[in-house]
Image (cartoon, helix red, strand yellow):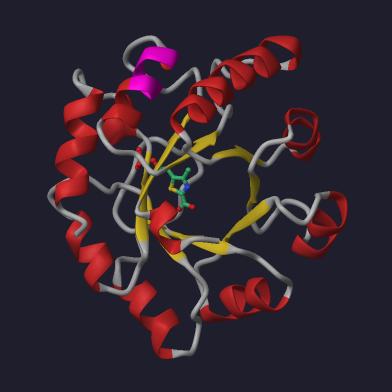
Amino acid sequence: MNREQLLLYFIMGTNNSAGSPLRVLTNAIEGGVTCFQFREKGQGALEGAEKEQAARDMQAICRKHGVPFIVNDDIELALELQADGIHVGQDDESIEAVRKKCPDYMIVGVSAKTVNEAAQAQKQGADYIGTGPMFSTTTKADAKSPIGPGAITELRENGIDLPVVGIGGIKKENASEVIRAGADGVSVISSISMDEDPKQAARLLKNQLT
Ligand code: 3NM
């Protein structure tokens, strides 16, 4: 995994964008997003054929702009679409099982917040980890209490050298703190998807990261 591709990692489903999801994604990419994850979860999430079509439409936009397209949680969909990657949580399938099902080129990302989880992910062949919530968030219904950017510093101090993105409650005002703590990038949903100007939101966020 190329660490630079994780710098501004945008995540969205059709149920968490203020405007048309395809327009939001296009604008976000034009504003500088470096990676995208399709995460169709929670209230109002599409299922079945509608979910697949939404994913295909977003993948086409990502392809056109050369942005990696990663699918959250749904391995069958990732395989069907030949997505660039798959992201799984601690409660989803083991990384080893995911690795076995997916072709070698596929990026495998894992959510990991403790040194233990991160070391396990590293050992099992994850390409990057997502650590959070950094700050409080209302986007994920079952999000835990914030663990803060210090959790990333702790991973680094304990020898975790995998690419890491911070996630949860990240916006332009606190993003640089996450990078300074040792992250390669930040993952955001609402600070881009719910902004009335996603392109400008992405641009302003990115300005804080380098
Ligand atoms: N995962 P926002 S927090 C999808 O802690 C997700 O693992 C989290 O949304 C974790 O950028 C989160 O709007 C929600 O806060 C991120």
Say which of 146 and 206 sits in front: 206
Q: Is residue 177 left or right of residue 64?
A: left
- Residue 126 image offset from top left, x and y in percent: 65, 65
Q: Quadrant of residue 151?
A: bottom left
The image quadrant where one finds the C terminus is bottom left
- Residue 129 image offset from top left, x and y in percent: 53, 63
Which residue is found at the position 73% from the left and 51% from the top?
Answer: 92
Magenta stretch holds residue 25 = yes
Say which of 52 and 111 sits in front: 52
- Residue 51 image offset from top left, x and y in percent: 66, 17
Q: Is residue 25 left or right of residue 57?
A: left
Magenta stretch holds residue 34 = no
Give the magenta range. 22-26
Q: Residue furthest bottom?
A: 158
Q: Quadrant of residue 132?
A: bottom left
Location of residue 204 with respect to 61 vertically, above or below: below
Location of residue 80 with respect to 113 vertically, above or below: above
